[in-house]
Amino acid sequence: MVDYTTYVSQLETMIAMDAADADFPTIIPAIINYAEMRIYRELDLISTIFRDTSVTLAPQIQNATLPNTFVTVQGINILTPVGGAVATSARVPLVPASKELIYALWGDPTVTGQPQMFAMVDQWNVLFAPSPDLAYTIEAYGTQRPAPLSASNTTTFLTTYLYDLFLAASMIFASGYMRNFSSTGSDPQMPISWESQYQALKASANVEELRKKSWSDAWTAFSPTPLAQPPRG
């Protein structure tokens, strides 16, 4: 596990930066932001998934707003019975659909029942069909952006389990900071080399994420093998 202080120290060493340079501390947040945002967008990390049960639907109202901590919504469940404890409620999964399908099938909001479908209207607003007949609590689950690495948040999932990938992504941005992105830079191959290293590390990290979800060979949690790859029957 690597903490913020060690990360900054290693970054200084790798880019041959003078620790006394007043410009270096100001660019560190941008380096971290680039590295974290790129990894979070390109890898579907199971560590970024969370569940929320804070939203209760209003009867005869088709729309509801989810917390703005969601980046992607992967699914929504209706909890039954109405008013029951979240821990002991039954989960009724809703079918994701397009807004057009919901408007075509359930365009009349006065037609109510237990919702069967949902569609994302925008980043956080959801359309349900049919309109809820009761005040159902929903369980939404999806991805969020974890708190970034900083002097006050000294470790993250990336610095603990994917530090090699995180450092490689950091060095791609640092290459721009060092003005090595252009063909006239002092080391024009630097960003190309780090990008190549990043892609190799990302491929292995992606396999590990697939294993966590039992999405590897034959829908198992084991590493891929060139011999045993039967599809699920």
Image (tube, rainbow, N blue to C red):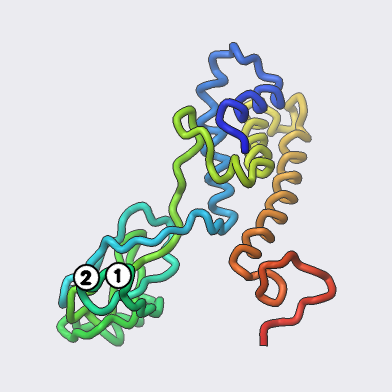
- In the picture as drawn, the residue positioned furthest to the right comes out as 227
Q: Is residue 159 left or right of residue 137?
A: right
Residue at 62%, 46% (x, y): give it.
161
Q: Tell me, yes or no, if residue 100 can be seen here.
A: no
The N terminus: image quadrant: top right
Q: What residue occupies the far top of the structure in this picture?
A: 20
Residue annotated with mark 1: 138
- State left or right for residue 86 relative to residue 202: left
Q: Report x, y in % for residue 95.
A: 40, 80
Q: Nearer the viewer, residue 22 or 156?
A: 156
Q: Residue at x 69, y 25 (%)?
A: 15
Q: Is residue 113 above or below residue 14?
A: below
Q: Where is mark 2, residue-wise?
A: 57
Q: Would you say the residues marked 2 and 1 are in contact, meaning their CB atoms lie under 8 Å apart?
A: yes
Q: Position of residue 168 (x, y in %)?
A: 68, 39
Cα separation, mark 2 vs mark 1, equals 7 Å
